[in-house]
Amino acid sequence: MRSMQWMALAAAVALAACGGDDNDATGPGDGGALRTFSADVTGDVQASIKGDALFGQASDPDYGDVFGLEMSEAGAGEGFIQVVRLGGAVPAPGEYAITDAIHGTPQDGDFVAMAFDSDNGQPTAIFVATGGTLKVTSSSGSAFKGTFTFDAQGGLFSDPETTLSIKVSGSFHAAPATPELRLNSRAIRRSR
């Protein structure tokens, strides 16, 4: 079977605030930038998660320009969700299809989505979207808001031969990652 090549992209794009104070993200007098999300995971894995949401653009020699939305759970679970637009263009308000990154070949302008789980900072599971929808209700330099839902396949790193299916649905009110995004690579399993 074909390699899950987009799992490499999924694990490579990690938003991180690099320096600066997060409350400065939306300018003076903003009273603190809103940067929250909540999501429900159903299917072979069940969870409700919430935490911080950041967005921004990055460029990497291996993956090109990307726009990313990262939603990172606070606490012991350490799950996170990423929605990435290839080509790096900032999405305007509207509804966008999330592309099948396992069986398809995403192109510039396409959105891909991933969900990860970790334990004490160590990756334990990865899921890559096979389709879904991103609805952007507000898009500016200071806030990115909307909802998402996607079906995904993947599995546990401890059991790479078993494919699990999940559905992820949620909402976000993201603040900009400041001053820039950082890309990190991780080892990725391949499907059989």
Image: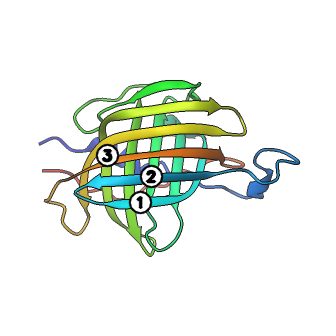
Residue name at image x 55 percent, y 45 percent:
172
Instruction: Please state which amino acid type lies under the numbered disc 2.
Output: Ala
Q: Secondary structure at mark 1?
A: strand
In this rendering, which labeled residue sits more in front, label 1 or label 3? 1
What scheme was used to colour the molecule?
A: rainbow
Q: Quadrant of residue 146?
A: top right
In this rendering, which labeled residue sits more in front, label 3 or label 2? 2
Q: Residues within 10 Å of mark 1 (few under 14, many from 20)?
A: few
Instruction: Please state which amino acid type lies under the numbered disc 3.
Output: Val
Nearer the N terminus, badge 1 or badge 3? Answer: 1
Residue carrying label 3: 128
Residue carrying label 1: 48
Residue name at image x 64 percent, y 51 percent:
35
* x and y, in percent, of residue 60 in the image: 52, 41
Alpha-carbon span between mark 1 and mark 3: 18 Å
- Identify the disc placed on residue 39: 2
Q: Secondary structure at mark 3?
A: strand
Alpha-carbon span between mark 3 and mark 2: 16 Å
Instruction: Please state which amino acid type lies under the numbered disc 1.
Output: Ser
Residue name at image x 39 percent, y 40 percent:
149
State if disc 2 and disc 1 touch (CB < 8 Å). yes
* x and y, in percent, of residue 113 in the image: 39, 42
From this view, report whether residue 153 is shown above or below residue 131: below
Residue name at image x 19 percent, y 61 percent:
160
Q: Does residue 63 appear anywhere in the picture? A: no
Q: Residues within 10 Å of mark 2 (few under 14, many from 20)?
A: many
